[in-house]
Amino acid sequence: MSTPDAGEYFTLDEKLERAGDGRYLELDGIDPVQFVPGLVFRPVLGDRTMVNWVHFDPGTEAPKHAHEEEQITFVVEGEFEFDLDGDVRVMRPGMVAVIPAGVPHGARTHDSSCLEIDVFVPPRKVLLETMRAAEADPD
């Protein structure tokens, strides 16, 4: 393990301009988004990044798709079968998939549920549009 100078990482650069104010959120307070039954998204949005908490019920599929945003997926609990452009693997806690823009991918659970986190840069456009539509029409 490399041991770099911590002062290079943990530094306060007084020349940096603040991009805004930080905030705290409760995951349960984030309105869920559900495109497919059994697949619940709770997206957290920053200025240039989206972190999406995703819960798969058992027997749920996220159909194969591709998008312009880069995605990194982390499995937190349970497991699912992940298809990364034809390379299919069972992912369990601690496993990570890196999905470049335009690469087809999909996932499915079998007998167990799965909690995973997707990070999108830039934020996933279709999810942003869905969140904005829900805010505009709360019913």
Image (cartoon, rainbow, N blue to C red):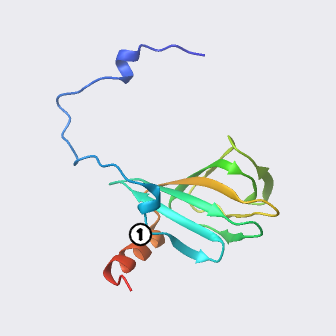
Tag 1 secondary structure:
helix
Q: Amino acid at mark 1?
A: Leu
- Looking at the rendered image, the quarter that the N terminus falls into is top right
- Asked if 10 appears above or below 125 in the picture, the reply is above
- Looking at the rendered image, the quarter that the C terminus falls into is bottom left
Residue 22, how many percent across, how many down? 28, 46
Residue 26, how many percent across, how many down? 41, 54
Q: Which residue is nearer to you in this view: 68 or 78?
A: 78
Residue plotted at (20% across, 35% down): 16
Residue plotted at (68% across, 40% down): 94
Residue 77 falls left or right of residue 18? right
Q: Which residue is nearer to you in this view: 107 or 104?
A: 107
Residue 111, how many percent across, how many down? 82, 62
Residue plotted at (41% across, 62% down): 29
Q: Which residue is mark 1?
A: 128
Residue 130 falls left or right of residue 118? left
Residue plotted at (69% across, 57% down): 114
- Asked if 136 appears above or below 52 in the picture, the reply is below
Q: Using the rendered view, name the quadrant where residue 132 is placed.
A: bottom left
Residue 121, how many percent across, how many down? 46, 54
Residue 67 appearing in the image? no
